[in-house]
Image: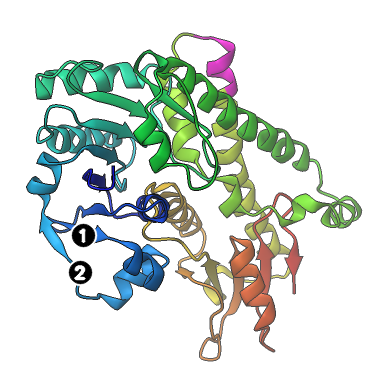
Amino acid sequence: MANDKIVIFGLTTQGYALASEIVTNGHSVYVIDESAASAILIDADIVKNYPTVSSLKEDEPILSLIPTDIALSTAEYLFFGPRIRKTGSDIKTDITSKFKNTTSKIKNGCSVVYTLPTGLGGNNENISLLEHITGFTVGKKINYFYYPLGTDEFDYIGSFDGEQNKKLDKLLKAKKNKKFVNISSSELIHAINILSRFSKLTGLLEVCRFATEKTSKSDLITNKFSELYLDDMISDLFDLRSLSTSFEGSTNLVALSNSCLKSIDGYVKRLIDEIRLILKKNELKASRTKILLSWSLDQHDMKGDKNEMLENIILKLRDYIGDVDAVEGDVDLFNTDKTTLVIACSKYDYEKLKNNAKDDDRILIKANPIFETIK
């Protein structure tokens, strides 16, 4: 087993974490960097010296490399998890193109593990495409598994006919045993997990719309959800969108997923309305105001939800205020003559801002459900 060639397509935070998990179990892994035509050997020494993909990228150590085509054509296990930065209808086209190019090189006997969320029925499409590209029959010549990587660890692996694969089980056994189920069942379990989390969030956001009075806002600040930030809210938004596009007709599931998506859109609108209200209350002119969105994003994240959301908010704010920028953590406002509104989009960013509090005229807004404002 130790000699089996394990390849991960996608040098992302999730892909590197997966590689580290497999390396912990005594195996070496090749990770394909999409930006280069090469596969990087990740072994125990690399994982020890570079615990994250960020540290690996920053230090740029001398690495053992092989051409991408060789890595793919010799892979026993291929984990597919590319970096997604396209938006809208271009996302599916981009993923399909990468899936075709990647799997066209695999050999007889390879096991393909799909780590992106597909929604319901998406894996059947993948299997049909895989068989068409390779000429191999899934379940006979090659294997296919569904293991979506997300914020929370997924305890199930979808497999063809629900059969257990002992080798794959051992590869992923660093934390806990995984249960093998039918691919359709794994899609349903993932859908339940995602919809449960976002429907709970939707209830919270919709009720907080009514916290408009100073007293109610003050009372709610003491609640634990005041530490829920925009960064937390939209984790795995990609999964929710994938699900919503896989539902058909006018079922309750369509209504539920759409209401979750609309609630997040509504939250963004409320955030912008809150900023306009702060300007009005403080008699601030738009031309004399600067807005900074403090959001330390993981640029190596497999999914592009947060980058897309940040760009979306900046564009919407610029309709009202021209001077809008994104920053990470704290920022020195010494050279500005404008009143600055700083929006903390994550707990990490808020703590950084709080710990480095300056004696300037900034107004700090926590991007939580009640928009807690600190002068």
Residue 356 against residue 240 in the figure, above or below: below
Q: What is the magenta range?
A: 250-256
Picture mark count:
2
- Earlier sequence position, callout 2 versus callout 1: 1
Q: Quadrant of the C terminus?
A: bottom right
Foreground residue, 128 or 233? 128
Q: Where does residue 301 sit, x and y in percent of width and height?
A: 40, 54
Q: Judging from the image, what secondary structure is the residue with disc 2 in?
A: loop
* Residue drawn where x is 63% and y is 34% of the image: 197
Q: Residues within 10 Å of mark 1 (few under 14, many from 20)?
A: many
Q: Quadrant of residue 357?
A: bottom right
Residue annotated with mark 2: 63
Q: Is residue 375 left or right of residue 251?
A: right
Q: Are marks 2 and 1 in contact (CB under 8 Å)?
A: yes
Residue 268 against residue 288 in the figure, above or below: above
Residue annotated with mark 1: 40
Numbered tag placed on residue 16 in the rendering: none
Foreground residue, 134 or 364? 134
Whether 15 is among the magenta residues is: no
Give the dominant element type of the magenta stretch: helix, strand or loop.
helix
Q: Whole-Å distance between the Cαs marked 2 and 1? A: 7 Å
Q: Judging from the image, what secondary structure is the residue with disc 1 in?
A: strand
Report the amino acid beneath label 2.
Leu
Q: Where does residue 24 sit, x and y in percent of width and height?
A: 42, 55
Q: Residues within 10 Å of mark 2 (few under 14, many from 20)?
A: few
Q: Where does residue 164 sit, x and y in percent of width and height?
A: 41, 23
Foreground residue, 291 or 190? 190
Q: Quadrant of residue 138?
A: top left
